[in-house]
Image: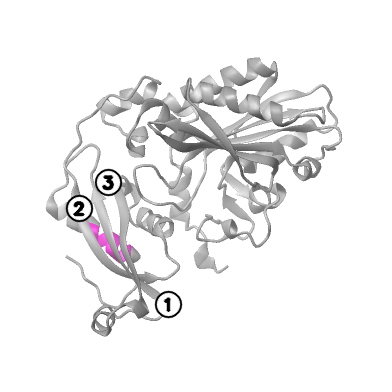
Amino acid sequence: MSHTDYLTSDQLYRALNVRDLTDPDQGRHAIQALLQSVIDRLQPEWDSSLRYVRSSPVVPVRDNYDRLGYDPGDVTRARRYTRYISPAVMLRSHMSAELPRALEDYAGMSEVDELLVASGLVYRRDAVDRTHVGEPHQVDLWRIRSTPDTDDQDMLSMIGELVEAVLPDAQWRTTDVAHPYTVGGRQIDVRHDGEWLELAECGRIHPEVLRGSGLDPERWSGLALGMGLERALMLRKGIPDIRYLRAEDPRIATQMLTLDPWQHVSLLPAARRDLSVVVDAEEDEETLGDRIRVALGDNADVIESLEVLSRTPHDGLPEAARSRLGILDGQVNLLLRIVLRPIDRTLTSDEANVIRNVIYEAVHEGPVMELI
């Protein structure tokens, strides 16, 4: 990995100054109310003690991957998905990174049945649309017990309480899924507006994770559950656009303080721009979204969506088009549709063109520039 694969100081500063909506010290938010409703169902059900885990999102790569059982060659470790600060340090990509260290505190203890709540921002390279952001919020809910007999029935009970807290009376189902840090992993889907949507994933804590934190799996066991809080809140309230969670418009911001159903707010006009760009064949909507967010900085939230309308490899283009674009073998021609719709103002045509050009220059890798 070259030095260019690491975050710049400006990128790190920006990432660390994003408001954490799960943190009461940074102001009230409906995400906190939703999380509290989950805790209020799980803790009495288990009669467990409660522990909050909150620390810096800057974590050792070892904690984010190695201690959770990720293979050294796992694709998730790649620069395209992970925000590295140095070879050994990164911005956590999931809240599970906080748990191996937290579990170390139980070594030598007895009579433990505790619910650990680790919530906060995680850092991804993600698509740009109404349901994805580059710094989403997650919560990991881990139950640690000084007994080896935590079983699938305990997990199903946890799932039932979670769903009832997030979406009361919703239908739910589970499917098998593999995590390196759990056994018996399950994906939890809920039925909402006639379709099945993923809500969370869980499993029993893997014996090797326990052992790596100094806990004998013959004496300890537990459950590990992770949930994306934006998705959960948007389902609960019926919020149509993830950007609303941080909106300052009073018509929206006041609705982000409670779990009351979303009340429609009139949308401002959209500006649409279609771009033809040349990029490396390995680029996808996630990596393009990340490049665009970095380029736009504070203006990134003006983008409502980015859609790849077509993807044509070098060899699939007519010779005239290859010549016009200056495309090389190993590159592709993408037709992108950008929808610009700020939440709190209307863009002029000139402003939309400036943003269009910034996006174009951020993603286009061909020698021929088509700016407007």
The range drawn in magenta is 356-362
Residue at label 1?
330
**Which residue type carries mark 3?**
Val
Rendered-image quadrant of the C terminus:
bottom left
Asked whether, in this view, residue 145 is left or right of residue 10, the answer is right
**Residue shown at 60% from the left, 28% from the top:** 159
Query: What residue did someone put label 2 on?
Result: 272
Q: CA distance from mark 2 to mark 1?
A: 29 Å
Q: Residue 97 vs residue 253: left or right? A: right
Crowding at dot 3, Cα within 10 Å, few <14 / some 14-19 / many 20+, comes out as many
Q: Are marks 3 and 2 in contact (CB under 8 Å)?
A: no
Q: In the picture, residue 317 is in which quadrant?
A: bottom left
Badge count = 3
Viewer-side label of 3, 2? 2
Where disc 2 sits, the SS reads: strand
Residue 311 is inside the magenta segment: no
Q: Are marks 2 and 1 in contact (CB under 8 Å)?
A: no
Q: Is residue 359 magenta?
A: yes
Would residue 36 be seen by someone viewing this image from the given angle?
no
Residue 137 percent coordinates (x, y): 49, 37
- 287 with respect to 63 (left or right): left
Q: Residues within 10 Å of mark 1 (few under 14, many from 20)?
A: few
Quick check: 127 left or right of 169?
left
Give how far across and how far down residue 342 sits, in percent. 24, 42
